[in-house]
Amino acid sequence: MADPEEAPASKKRNDPTSQLARGELVHAEVKPLDLSGIPSVIVGIVAWAVAFVIVLIFRDRLRESGDEWWLWVTVAGFGLGWIGLAYCRHRWTAIQAGHRPATED
C-alpha cells in the first residue's frame, strides 16, 4: 500500500503553455515566405471573382430568399482586393528601393 505522505512522482503540468513558461519549449525563428503579399492578394481577388460568378448563377434563388445582397459582397471584396493589390505593390516598391524596412507594418 502506498504511503499517504509520499509526494506523487510528478505534479508538473505538461500543457504547452506551462512548458513555454518554464522555458522547455523554444520557438523556432521562422521567416515569412512572401514579404510582398502580392501573390496572396491576387489569390484573394481571384477567389472573390469566382464567388461572384457562383453567386450570379444562384441569383434568382438569392432574390427569392432576400439574400441578393451577397452579390454586392463579392463585388466589394473584388474591388477592395484591387485596392489591396495597389497598396502591396506600392509597399513592395518602397521596400525594394530601401525606403522602408521589410518588417514594418
Image: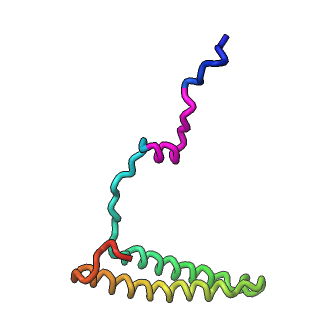
> Residue 70 at x, y = what percent?
65, 83
Query: In this image, 17 relative to 35: left or right?
Result: right
Q: Is residue 38 left or right of residue 45?
A: left
Q: Which residues are magenta?
A: 10-22
Residue 5 shown in magenta: no
Report which quarter residue 54 is drawn in.
bottom right
Nearest the viewer among 47 and 37 is 37
Q: Would residue 81 appear left or right of 86 to someone viewing this image?
A: right
The x and y percentages for residue 99 are: 25, 83
Which image quarter holds the N terminus?
top right
The figure's colour scheme reads rainbow
Q: Residue furthest left?
A: 97
In the depicted structure, whether residue 51 falls above or below residue 6: below
Residue name at image x 54 percent, y 34 percent: 12
Q: Nearer the viewer, residue 61 or 47?
A: 47
Residue plotted at (59% across, 24% down):
8
Counting from the top left corner in percent of width and height, residue 7 is at 59, 23
The furthest residue to the top: 1
Q: Where is residue 105 drawn, in percent x and y?
A: 39, 77
In the depicted structure, whether residue 76 falls above or below residue 8: below
Residue at 41% x, 78% y: name it.
42
Q: Quadrant of residue 29?
A: bottom left
Q: Along the line of sight, which residue is nearer the eye, 40 or 17?
A: 17
30 or 2, which is in the foreground? 2
